[in-house]
Image (cartoon, grey):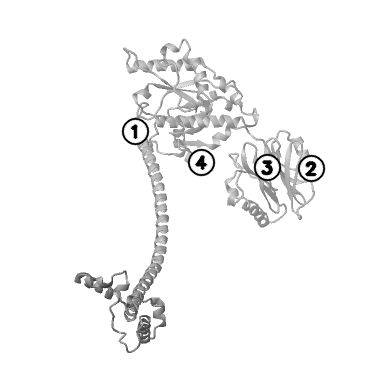
Amino acid sequence: MAEVRPEDVSIPHSPTSVVQDMDEDGEGFVEDAEEAVGAAVGNHPGDGHGKRRRPDRSREGGLGEDFDDESPSKRGQRAEGEESGVVTSRELRLLLGQHMRDMKAAWGVVEQRVAAVEKTTKGHDKELKAVHIKHKALDNKVLGIQAKGDATARKTDDIHNELQKLQTRVDDIEKKQSTTTDDPWADYLNNKKGAPHDIPHKSAGKDETKGLSEEDQRTLIVGGWLPDTRRAKIEEEVKIILEEPDIKPSLDSDRLVVFGPRRSFGMLRFQVRDGESPTDVKKRMWEVIAKIRGGKYILPSTQGEHGHGGKMIWASFLKTPEARRRSALCSLVRRITIQLAGVGNHAKNEAAMVNESYDVDWGTGTIWNGELKLASATHRKDAARDEDFFQLNQGWVDLRNLKEDKSSVQLATWNLGGQPVGKVTTGAPGADIFLVQEIARGDSGWQEHETDTHFWLTHRREEQWRGTGVGISNEIFDSVISRKQTARGMLALVKLRDRGKIILGSLHAYTGVTNRVYQQEIHAFLRELGGKWRKYPCVIGVDANEAVTWDSGGLISLLMRDL
């Protein structure tokens, strides 16, 4: 019978199942395993199954007796290999137990590290949130700083511009100290008020070439076109002077320089010819200006402007910024006055619609219409009526004198004595505005109606016997903006066509009452003109029911001076 080696015996359990079936001390498993190995090799208890027996080599591979012929070295290697392949259950148990302890220890370390990472991550979330909030606050702060920087840059530019303007004014003052120009109007005002005569007048003296380059000094401004005229139209119409045989020999250019797609003027450049001096160039330029002015060339694109045959082309030297500022004031005032005089196509002030009616001093920036000084950039204004002047960047404008040039509006006030408003137009057919009292009795409250010629707004309180009202010509009436009423009168803020807003009112004062009651009602009526209404012009028709006192100078006395 062949000998069975221990390493050839198959153990009927896996290492895992062996560990699971093992007792707590592991002893029972070892004994059972050893008995199983003994039974497999044919040993019995007490036969010394614990000793190894040499296998019968004669049955394995036909070795037989030749087995003993192996060399000692081969036999030693074979025996050593056989002994190293034996692993006991105790060793396996110890190996697995040690491996399990290492795994538990390693897993504990991993859990600790994971817990530490989670703790750190939670802290990072809070920190990231705080950083995000700070970053957002910083962004807002940066935006605010940028906005302040932009505002500072704009203010710096404004300050720079103001400094330049101030420098220009200082230069003008220095020049004016050397030369003076009489201002008759200022002299008259000073004499009238008893002002000292040693007050220096503003001067119009100036250096026309100061601040201009040599090329600009040899340049003429040619204008007369309407604002925003196309460049092609300007270049086409200017040929009437550029190709004029009497003017062409004095020119050095056959075209007008126009900057931008739309303008109202262009520039004509001159060059110094051989043998010419700057004075000779100026002389040629003056000749061109005189010939253009004398030719009275009408621009076709402006025909029909302001009801006339068109505007004439003009030419002048290129001026300094200060000179252009003064000239612009005169041109602006003259243009606006002509437009106001022509509003509504009325022929009430035709003289104000003609350029020749205005006297213009371009050097001082002053313009007159007849005896009225409309505006000035250098003359002093009348301090006694400062509220009549409007200050522009270029100078001041006298609004009172300006309104004198505008077409007038005829106004009438009437106590109808119980008659209907329709009859008043028969008595004054040319009046544009009526301020009436004691209208024929009708319904109480506000009433509006129109006739063929006028719009009427009337009011009567319940306790009043007869009401008051205003009538406005349909030609100038636009709308009623607001209205107020008192016990004895009414007020209306109306808009007149092409004339703006005005307050119209009518008051029928008490009769047969004490002075206290009379004044109380007058005060109550005038209080309605306060607040936002103070800024509007006002015309009120009053039936005072009192005798009016006149002084020796022909002026009406103020009976209620405190009002």
Tell me which amino acid carries mark 4. Arg
Mark on residue 420? Answer: 2
Q: Is residue 69 above or below residue 297?
A: below
Discs 4/3, front: 3
Tell me which amino acid carries mark 3. Ser
Quadrant of the image containing the N terminus:
bottom left
Q: Quadrant of residue 268?
A: top left
Task: Name the secondary structure under disc 4.
Answer: helix
Residue 99 placement (x, y as % from top left): 34, 75
Label whose residue precedes the other's in the sequence (3 or 2): 2
Task: Name the secondary structure under disc 1.
Answer: helix
Discs 4/1, front: 1
Q: Tell me what residue is drawn at x 48 percent, y 13 percent.
A: 243
Task: Name the secondary structure under disc 3.
Answer: strand
Q: What is the distance, in whole Å, between disc 3 and disc 2 at their CAs? A: 23 Å
* Crowd band around label 2 with a 10 angstrom C-alpha radius: few (<14), some (14–19), many (20+): few
Mark on residue 385? Answer: 4
